[in-house]
Amino acid sequence: MKSEKKWIPYAFLLPNMLIFAIFVGLPAIFGVVYAFTEWNGLSDPVFIGIENFVTIFTDDEFWSMLVRTMLYVIFVVPLTVMSALALAWLLTRGLKGSGFFRAVFFLPVMISFIVSGLIWNWILQTDTGLINFLLNTMNIGSVEWLSNSFFANLSVVMVTIWSRVGFFMLIFVAGLQSISPALYEAAEIDGAGPWKKFLKVTIPMLRPITLLVIILSFIEFFKTFALVVSLTGGGPINATTYYVQYTYDTAFELGNFGLGSALSLVLFVIMAIVTLVQWKVSNGGRV
């Protein structure tokens, strides 16, 4: 009787599996196929072998964009992880109003990237933005937040951290609350102060969660798109055009869907390699 009901759990999974196969699996397979074709989205695709990949890896603009994307990720990932850990540690100290501040820091996570980008685009405008209004009030002078390459990248980093730090903060909060108080009591008996307990107990116990946050944030920030497009539009002069926007522009602005598919496949390979390296370095998540 029991063996006859083994199919029931799989029957509940079937609708989700079908949806995943139709809307994720099939497009992914078609994307791999189109990466080896010349296709403008209207005519029939023409198989051209690895020509798209040769075009990609011999294009100076691609390497410039890739370096720009890597620099953005290298800055924003550690800053986000450290900010999230610091906030989580402070908000689990039993301070008054910690519940309120958790909600405040998590609130930006609930706002869509496009809305967040548009809000900060208004705040950072050179002539009419709120930030420059406050700076002028203090006689500091205006800053070209979105029309200067350096400040545009700085603005993207700041807004990215603002929009996502609350999400990773909650993950760290869950990790901190799972650490046994007995470990801290044992450390106190050995004479450890707050800072030593943080270094010798908190950090080691949070290593698996820290690895998870690093991997998730790296993948998410490397694929950043909507927030940057609505904030800077990729400008000024492509200074904030990162990988996914470059792929989008290639496919939909230039009408080269074959090359766009090849760029997506290269992105998938980069993500897989980075994740495997991080997994290997962390000894399979048992850092």
Image (cartoon, grey):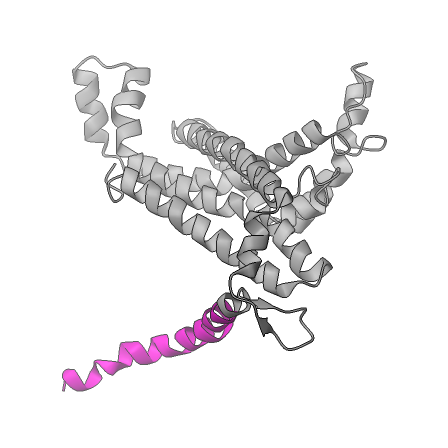
Quadrant of the frame with the C terminus: top left
Between 9 and 114, the one nearer to me in the picture:
114
128 or 157: nearer the eye?
157
* Relative image position of residue 63 (x, y in whole percent): 58, 41
**Residue lying farthest right?**
127
Up-down relation of residue 178 to residue 47 (above or below): above
Residue 112 visible (yes or no): no
Does the magenta segment cover residue 29? Answer: yes
Nearer the observer, 239 or 229? 239
Q: From what the image shows, is residue 45 above or below residue 112?
A: below
Residue drawn at the location 44% of the way across and 53% of the way down: 269
Q: Residue at x 81, y 14 (%)?
A: 139
Give coordinates of residue 122: x percent, y percent: 77, 39
Q: Quadrant of residue 37?
A: bottom right
Task: Report the front residue among 24 and 37.
Answer: 37
What segment carries the magenta color?
1-30
- In the displayed structure image, the side of residue 109 where residue 181 appears, left or right: left
Report the quarter where the N terminus lies. bottom left
Count of marks overlaid on the render: 0
Q: Position of residue 233 (x, y in %)?
A: 73, 45
2 is within the stretch colored magenta: yes
| Relative vertical location of residue 186 with respect to residue 220 in this rendering, above or below | above
Q: Position of residue 187 (x, y in %)?
A: 20, 20
Decide whether the magenta segment is chiefly helix, strand or loop.
helix
Q: Is residue 44 above or below residue 200?
A: below
Determine the residue positioned at 56% across, 67% down.
Answer: 48
